[in-house]
Amino acid sequence: MLCSGMVTKEDSRMVRFPIRFNGITDVKDFVHIVNSYPYDVDLSCGRYVVDAKSIMGIFSLELQSAIDLEIHSNTCDDLVEALTRFRTED
């Protein structure tokens, strides 16, 4: 039995890259896209982590800077491709 704080090797697979939003329309489009896929997706900014499928959660983040996107799967090329326009190198 695993404790809730433990992470197995299988659970630790994810795809991570920085994204940036250029306005409210970007946020709405982003949420619509990620809600179309079955993967668990988080956004993190500093020590704050929110569900990327929650528009209210996203608006609680500092949107003027780059935000780290984490897709909790390593077989999510379809979602990565759909999010290309939000990707940044910051």
Image (cartoon, helix red, strand yellow):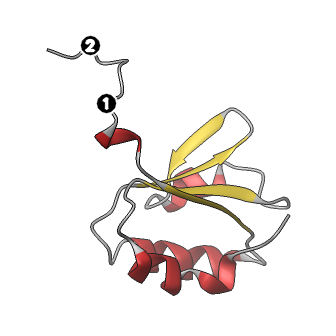
Among numbered discs 1 and 2, the one appearing first in the sequence: 2
- Foreground mark, 1 or 2, reads 1
Residue at 43% in and 72% down: 34
Residue at which label 2 appears:
3
**Residue type (three-letter) at the residue carrying disc 2:** Cys
The image position of residue 5, as x and y in percent, is: 37, 18
Judge whether residue 32 can be spotted in this image: no
Secondary element under disc 1, as helix, strand or loop, is: loop
- 49 in relation to 17, above or below: above
Look at the numbered discs 1 and 2 and tell me whether their residues touch, using CB distance below 8 Å.
no
Residue at which label 1 appears:
8
The image position of residue 54, as x and y in percent, is: 46, 58
Name of the residue lying farthest toward the front: 9
Lateral position of residue 74 relative to residue 57, left or right: left
The image position of residue 63, as x and y in percent, is: 77, 60
Residue at 40% in and 53% down: 72
